[in-house]
Image (cartoon, helix red, strand yellow):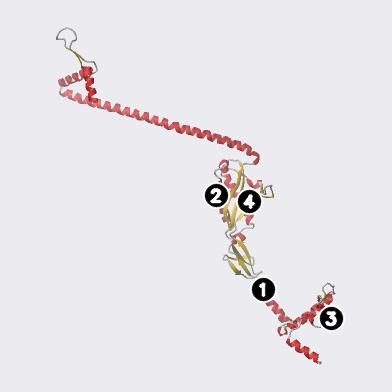
Amino acid sequence: MSNDDDQDKKNNGKKRQNPWAKNEPSDKKKDRSNNVTPFGPRNDSHDLEDMLKKATSGMSGLKDTLPGNMGPSKLFGLGIIIAAFIWILSGLFFIEPSEHGVVMTFGKYSKTEEVAGLKWHMPWPIQSHEIVNVTNERRIKIGFDDFSNRNNRGDVNNRDVKSESLMLTGDENIIDIDFVVLWKIGDAKDYLFRIRDPEATIKIVAESAMREIIGQTEIQPALTEARSQIQADTRQLMQDMLDEYEAGVQINNVQLQKVDPPAPVIDAFNDVQRARQEKEELRNKAEAYRNGIIPVARGEADKMIQEAEAYQQEVVNRATGDAARFSAIYNEYKNAKTVTSERLYIEALEKVIGNSNTVILDNAGGQGAVPYLSIDALTNKSKTNKAN
């Protein structure tokens, strides 16, 4: 063996060589500086068989460079270990604060991860996970959808869906209603496993609940003051139905977008509304007039009743007094008939004379009414002085 061969063996034991450079001709080493690959120029075509041979020789050279001159079996074992490590790492997943992670074992529910952070489960196909956002508020439109075309001002046009928006009211009128349902996921497990298509189910439940509430409401309140009540009742009814389905959905709000009569009869309906407004105006005027007249009439009636009752009481009291006085006089008359008769005679004269003009004449002197005294004048003057 030559000295060059001994030197090559020493070099092979001390440092690693490029496996692609083994047995490589010196002219090809020079070609690398001129943008030439070990298989030839970069832009030239080569035979497939030559390329395979060169790749095989390169792999044999690579085996010599591995630590401890590792064989194929050990290399295969190392590959299995690396693949197993990567497989285990594939079970890692991350949960945001607004998300829940549902872990499934062979497709069946296992647990729900609700705390944000890095999580791990057994890798696929043993376990898998589904990330669900439980804070985002979602919207479902009933009775209309957004039309892709925009008008000159850039506003999105809404297209009515008559099959969803036309509903029958409690007084058998047709009304056109567009509304929006705002909802979010309340329970990630129920949302994923209880119902097949949650959004389609929520839309069907919303339309059914709205039809039930409108079917119990007359058209006039539905168009005016009952809108807020309709929204609240529909939201509650939807929540009850979805809770019964265990859908894992929370209904946040129901917002009415449009409540109108159907388009073909809206002009006639407006005429009816104007007539009703005039009717209400006239009714209010009549009510105001009645509210002004009836209290006055009731007051006068009460006054007349009170006066009649007072007169009745007065007459009764007077008759009662006269009867009592007559009874007292009669009793005294039985005890002293002469005295009582004279007293009654004198009292009768007092009444008679009291109601007539009294003139005293002294005709002792003979002719004419010379001395004259008017008793009435004196009596009236005395009464006047007492009054003052």
Cα distance between the residues tagged 1 and 3: 43 Å
In the picture, the disc for residue 232 is: 2
Q: Residue at x 15, y 20 (%)?
A: 338
Q: Residue at x 20, y 24 (%)?
A: 329
Q: Within 10 angstroms of label 1, few (less than 14), some, or many (20 or more) residues?
A: few
| Residue 256 percent location from the top left of the image | 59, 48
State the SS at label 4: strand
State the SS at label 2: helix
Q: Earlier in the sequence, mark 1 or mark 2?
A: 1
Q: Earlier in the sequence, mark 3 or mark 2?
A: 3
| Residue 332 percent location from the top left of the image | 17, 24
In the picture, the disc for residue 86 is: 1
Quarter of the image that includes the N terminus:
bottom right
Q: Within 10 angstroms of label 3, few (less than 14), some, or many (20 or more) residues?
A: few
Q: Which residue is mark 4?
A: 141
Closer to viewer: mark 1 or mark 3: 3
Q: Residue at x 45, y 32 (%)?
A: 292
Q: Residue at x 72, y 79 (%)?
A: 76
Vertical placement of residue 123 versus 14, above or below: above
Cα distance between the residues tagged 4 and 3: 75 Å
Q: Is the C-beta separation of discs 1 and 4 under 8 Å? A: no
Looking at this view, is 145 or 12 the one in front? Answer: 12
Cα distance between the residues tagged 4 and 2: 17 Å
What amino acid is found at the position of numbered circle 1 in the picture?
A: Ile
